Amino acid sequence: MKNTILITGATSGIGKATAEFFLEKSWNVIATGRNSNKLEELKNKGAKIIELDVTSDSDINNLITYLVNNKVLVDVLVNNAGFGQFGTIEETNINTARKQFETNVFGLAAISQKIIPIMRKNKSGRIINISSVAGFVSMPGGGWYAASKHAVEAISDSMRWETKQFGIKVSLIEPGPIKTDFAQNVDKTIVHVSDSPYGDLMKNLTVSTDNIKGGTVNSCVKKIYKAATRKKPRNRYLVTKEAYLIKLLISIFPAKIVDLIVIKMFIGKK
């Protein structure tokens, strides 16, 4: 019997590449996302597509109804749906910040709460949460995004401890810079305020997302596959050499030195 993987945020980037990879491995793939038109390509390749906004209770209920009615046992859940809301802590409207958490944190939790009982009944399952290097280090102008990914890390740890007794394994994927449309989407929603005292910072941040360098979605997908198939998956999988380097630097240098490096990189001297 084929294994089944459910992927959120499969319309593009890491989510879409993951769906394509698992289809090639002859898995049953349930690809979900907010834009059903963008999922059509995956449908043509053999995936079951379902329109899903992880912040919508009705969408989630429709998904679960489909799974129950068709007696689908989800072997692997990949919580990939998310986006990056950038802007300074001061200038980002709280309602805008809440939207970041509604998708990246509460949406992930809402899907997991519905899938865990299915896995528990089957006495097995894998939950793979897509985090980021921002899950363990923040940056100027990216605090709200990093806060959401820090929350994903904390939730994943608790979930792993809580569900181990049911045969469920939980892993985190922590990519560094990945060549997707993430940066372009960040630039579309980044908070800019006219005559902002943070003007130079935000200008430089926008330029950096335009010129982003890093790994490919395939490097991320390979780690997801390992988390899905290894008998004893790791708790965390770093992706890209930049992610390894950042992790190393923050573990070696004292916090004050890290502060100086970050300020020099993003803000400069005043």
Image (cartoon, rainbow, N blue to C red):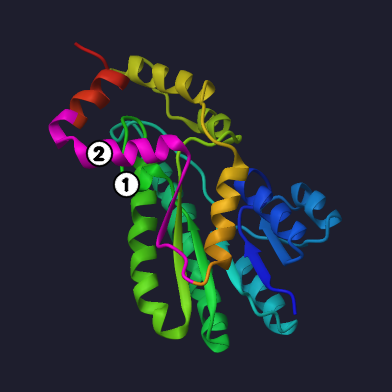
Circle 1: residue type: Phe
Q: Which residue is mark 2?
A: 250
Viewer can see residue 80:
no
Sequence-wise first label, 2 or 1: 1
Give the x, y percent position of residue 204: 40, 17
In this rendering, the label closer to the viewer, 2 or 1: 2
Residue 2, given in percent of the width and then of the height, sits at 74, 75
State yes or no: residue 100 in magenta: no
In the depicted structure, whether residue 259 falls above or below residue 97 = above
Q: Residues within 10 Å of mark 1 (few under 14, many from 20)?
A: some
Q: Identify the residue at image location x=81%, y=49%.
A: 41
Q: In the structure shown, which secondary structural element does the residue marked by tag 2 occupy?
A: helix
Mark sitting on residue 234: none
Verify whether residue 237 appears in magenta.
Answer: yes
Q: Residue at x 29, y 39 (%)?
A: 248
Residue identifier under label 1? 136
Q: Residue at x 51, y 62 (%)?
A: 128
- Helix, strand or loop for disc 1: loop
| Amino acid at the residue labelled 2 | Ile
Say how many tags the image has: 2
Farthest front residue in view: 231
Q: Is residue 14 left or right of residue 47?
A: left
What stretch of residues is rendered in magenta? 232-257
- Mark 1 and mark 2 in contact (Cβ < 8 Å)? yes
Q: Residue at x 58, y 33 (%)?
A: 179
